[in-house]
Image (cartoon, rainbow, N blue to C red):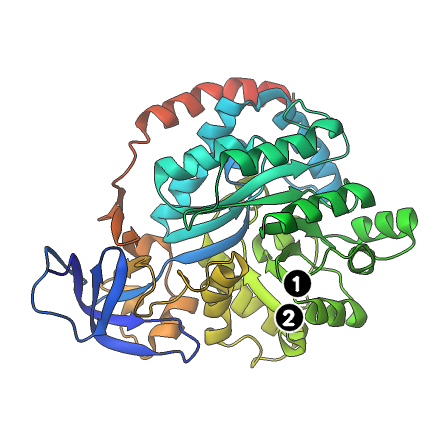
Amino acid sequence: MTDLIIKNATIVTADRAGTVLTGGVAVEDGRITHLGEVPDRAQEVVDARGGIVMPGLVNTHCHAADSLFRGLVENLPLEPWLQTVWKAERAILTAATCRLGARLGFAELLLSGCTSVVDMFWHPHSTARAGAELGLRVSCGGLFFDFPGMDGKTVDTRLPDAEAFFADHPRTDRLRPGTFPHGAYTVGPENLKIAKKLADDHDALFSTHAAETTVEQQTVQDSYGASVIRHMEALGILDARTILAHCVHCDDEEIAILARSGAVVAHNPVSNLKLASGFARIPDMLEAGVHVTLGTDGAISGNDIDMWLALRLAATLHKAASGRADVITTREALHMATLAGAEAMGLGTVTGSLEIGKAADLVVLDTSAPHAVPIFDPLTHIVYSAGRADVRHVFVDGQWRVRDRALTVFDMTETLDEIRALVPAIKESIA
């Protein structure tokens, strides 16, 4: 018998054709078996009550454990902001506190309908453990940083630590290990190439910050005689398994390089706005054929990790910045937040869209609230009107993760108490 049926729904598949159906979704052994018309019986039947069923959102750039420092450092541009952030991280972060912070961030993501995340942070073993506890899909791995890190480690430990992460965490559909150098201004050319080679040796993801600010661009230009993207191209580290976070400051040639190389751009509109980094040229990138996905960055730079806010901004701010109301369609915006992100994670055949045979990573949106009446087009509602408060149920591999807006797999009570107890020390760290 079928394991799960979700009935009485509008189904936004987020597939390449933009298919929208009415009816239900049937799941067996964690995989979607029917869309639209479904069997009459199942072990469990969930009534969507006329709501929307859609894929789980995919966040391709996050620092989940930085949720420990939400709202701590404000009203600064990136470079001085980072110096204060790093001071707090250096004082507070251990393997144990990183696990607490990752749980906090992953709980926020799951409750808002995000089922897959690319996460870059210190103590990645802690991130992986927290991801397993909460039950979402995570890509994380060894950091590379050419200075004493906020994890208390030095540059000579980075490669063996990254190798150990691969050894300790075999690749699965739930955990995708990778390498995560911080950026071209904090990691030298040789270590960038070492990190990319290690990722390639494991057929794994390589992700780094890139071209986020004009100061970063000038630093790399002064150090290596080329802009960030040109520098990375010369190093041979740009390909389809490379995710570059931000790419705010790119000229025409750099956009062409990104398109030609197949590198992925993780667009982070919330932090780019809040840190005054600028407006990424997303319409130009899409027109050039660049693979663009969506990220939240960390809660310390955007004050939450809300993919719905990122989605709405990605669909709206570029209209104003370009003066063109027709740029970034609803389908393009939703694609960034779903299938494009899954493909960037190497999970495009597993998740990111609702298709028969794919994993049942499902979100059920409540459409009974005033802001959801009427709905003329469900994609328009998802992109411009819906929010995390509308997320009623979440499934990963057909298994409950959020039921009636509450986590089902992990009791956060003790974790929240432990984090509250850290607050005085966190405040003191930057006093």
Q: Nearer the viewer, mark 2 or mark 1?
A: 1
| Whole-number angstrom distance, CA of label 2 to CA of label 1 | 7 Å
In x, y percent, where is residue 343? 50, 63
Q: Is residue 166 visible?
A: yes
Q: Which residue is mark 2?
A: 290
In x, y percent, where is residue 56? 37, 58
Q: How many numbered marks are there?
A: 2
Q: Which residue is mark 1?
A: 263
**Quadrant holding the C terminus:** top right
Q: Which is nearer the eye, 195 or 226?
A: 195
Hey, which residue is sitting farthest left in the picture? 41
Q: Residue at x 46, y 58 (%)?
A: 347
> Looking at the picture, which amino acid does disc 2 mark?
Val
Q: Residue at x 63, y 55 (%)?
A: 273
> Looking at the picture, which amino acid does disc 1 mark?
Ala
In x, y percent, where is residue 92? 58, 22
